[in-house]
Amino acid sequence: MDSLITAAAQALAAGDPLAALNRVALREDAPALALRGIAMAQLGDFPRAKALLRRAARAFGPRETVARARCVVAQAEIALVSRDLGWPAKTLDAARATLEERGDRLNAAHARYLEVRRLILIGRLDEAERRLAALDPAPLPPAWRTAHALVVAGIAMRRLRTQAARAAIDRAARAARRAGIPALTAEVESAALVLKRPAARLVANGEERLLRLDEVEALFASKALVVDACRHAVRDARTLASLARRPVLFALARVLGESWPGDVSRDTLLSRAFGAKVADESHRTRLRVEIGRLRRALRPLATVTATKRGFALAPRRSREVVVLAPPAEGEHAAVLAFLADGEFWSSSALSLALGSSQRTVQRSLDALAAAGKVESFGRGRARRWLTPPVPGFTTTLLLPAPLPSD
């Protein structure tokens, strides 16, 4: 390997893409193309980065399987950061297997971390935890130990284990200081801020207040009966009744929870749960049926009692009833929540993460764009959506390995 390629790879590993470009910007050989692609990715020009890495993969000879696999890993990371979640996971898995067979454990571990991050983004936390448990960060360089700790923190945040998340962020901060990469340190600081920002709203006794993640965790461990509008469930410290697939029942439970300890009139329940502006006998019959179903669903947690004007919620073991709601709600709140990380999302990636059809997501994006809440760039399959960064979950890292180190 010549000295310019070595120097450029070292500059990229230190987080200095401009220094790397100064050394290889005019070269067209395969290692230089790969390094230029990584440099452009670190500078945020993802389309050009992907094009350069594809050229590099083609330019490496058929015997240079390790170099080609590293290009695939770099392309996968760009796809992840640019929220192209439909990027073929099997291609990354094959590249990882090649790297492991050829003894490139560092880049193979990097590929595994990319797989875990993708699983976290699409909500498959159990599988992400299983794969992460198989990775030992001890022999890795500080930058990779930082990435490992941030992935651990991300899963812990989603599991509402704030102490574990805080400990992981502390480990990430120590590793980032050893790495000496400013962008990595900023990533850790951004992750730490998530624990200090509002994560949900508490509605109780007609009043609202914002809660941090640790306060939400404490609420779930308390003696309160929580009507959880974030996960569409009703829960106390010991039992959870999921109503995610029963939206009418959850709508009834939420209205009853917001009015506790008082009752709710039948007209209000019909309006909130069924959208009935003028109730007739068929609506009242349906209300009685759905209330019966709600009683069965909540039997371990609460009873729903009839009153003169309507119904009331009575917890069995809990001292009070509260409602936990997202910080912002509305028809397109879920789409906005994913866009809140400030990254570029495709409609297909949003569809995959939300579990909705791409057409439904596209309608939400069009409505948000008309309201001036989101913006799009590009056309066709290259079109990406974003919104100005607001408090949310930490973004992924963009720290590629020095590809041409063979």
Image: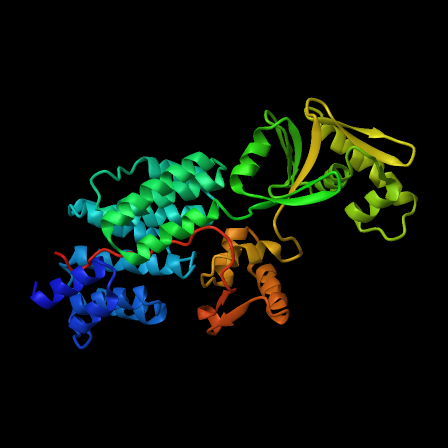
- Residue 311 image point, x, y percent: 84, 34
Q: Nearer the viewer, residue 30 or 371?
A: 371
State whether residue 263 is above or below residue 76.
above
Is 243 left, or right, of 384 in this rendering? right
Q: Nearer the viewer, residue 176 or 118?
A: 176
Q: Residue furthest top?
A: 317
Placement of the N terminus among the 4 image quadrants: bottom left
Q: Residue furthest left?
A: 2
- Image color mode: rainbow
Q: Nearer the viewer, residue 110 or 54?
A: 110
Q: Quadrant of residue 32?
A: bottom left
Visible residue check, residue 292: yes
Visible residue check, residue 148: no
Residue at 36 percent of width and 45 percent of height: 150
Q: Residue furthest bottom?
A: 26
Residue at 24 percent of width and 53 percent of height: 180
Residue at 18 percent of width and 55 percent of height: 66
Q: Quadrant of residue 2?
A: bottom left
Placement of the C terminus among the 4 image quadrants: bottom left
- Residue 6 image point, x, y percent: 12, 62
**Count of number-bearing discs:** 0
Is 176 left, or right, of 271 in this rendering? left
Is 302 left, or right, of 71 in this rendering? right
